[in-house]
């Protein structure tokens, strides 16, 4: 027991965790760690993590940036021509736009929305 205490006091933290807590060590190494926080602590302090880093906006995201129904229709048609949405999706979006309006897709997203989040 005394040998383990000496080893724990003088050894590398990762090695100690590996030896004394093998299941936890395996779990940490094997599982993908996802940060749900908007900040992460590093050796240099706290830094902000962008919530939308690597996020690929979809059709609704683009529609929410539109100021008018005409702009939204243009976006829907453009994405359809690029085969980014199907004809069925196009028709559903246009119907929603006609019946419920632009606001039904969510609040308007101003320039810089994704950078601020």
Image: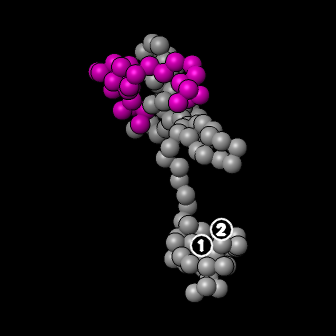
Look at the picture and state if 48 lies above or below 78: below
**Mark 1 closeness class: few <14, some 14–19, many ≥20 residues within 10 Å:** some
Task: Residue lying at the far left in this picture: please name it.
Answer: 99
Q: Is residue 27 magenta?
A: no
What percent of the width, then of the height, locates residue 103? Answer: 36, 19
Disc 1, SS: helix
Query: Please, what is the dominant secondary structure of the magenta stretch?
Result: helix
Viewer-nearest residue: 51 or 43 = 43
| Image marks 1 and 2: residues in contact by CB distance under 8 Å | yes
Q: CA distance from mark 1 to mark 2?
A: 6 Å
Q: Quadrant of the N terminus?
A: bottom right
Residue beneath label 2, please?
13
Q: Quadrant of residue 79?
A: top right
Viewer-nearest residue: 53 or 13 = 13
What percent of the width, then of the height, locates residue 80? Answer: 52, 33
What percent of the width, then of the height, locates residue 65? Answer: 50, 21
The residue at the point 45 percent across, 31 percent down is 60
Residue beneath label 1, please?
17
Look at the picture and state if 15 lies above or below 106: below
Look at the picture and state if 87 lies above or below 15: above
**Mark 2 closeness class: few <14, some 14–19, many ≥20 residues within 10 Å:** few
Q: What are the residue bounds of the magenta stretch?
A: 89-117
Look at the picture and state if 81 lies above or below 109: below
On the question of residue 30 being in view, the answer is no
The residue at the point 63 percent across, 38 percent down is 47
Q: Is residue 100 magenta?
A: yes
The residue at the point 53 percent across, 39 percent down is 38
């Amino acid at each position: 027991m005394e040998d383990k205490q000496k080893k724990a006091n003088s050894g590398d933290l990762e090695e100690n965790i590996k030896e004394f807590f093998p299941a936890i060590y395996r779990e940490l190494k094997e599982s993908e760690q996802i940060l749900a926080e908007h900040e992460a602590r590093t050796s240099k302090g706290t830094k902000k993590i962008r919530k939308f880093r690597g996020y690929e906006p979809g059709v609704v995201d683009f529609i929410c940036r539109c100021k008018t129904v005409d702009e939204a229709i243009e976006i829907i048609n453009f994405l359809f021509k690029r085969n980014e949405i199907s004809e069925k999706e196009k028709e559903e979006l246009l119907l929603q736009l006609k019946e419920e309006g632009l606001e039904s897709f969510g609040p308007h997203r101003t320039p810089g929305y994704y950078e601020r989040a």
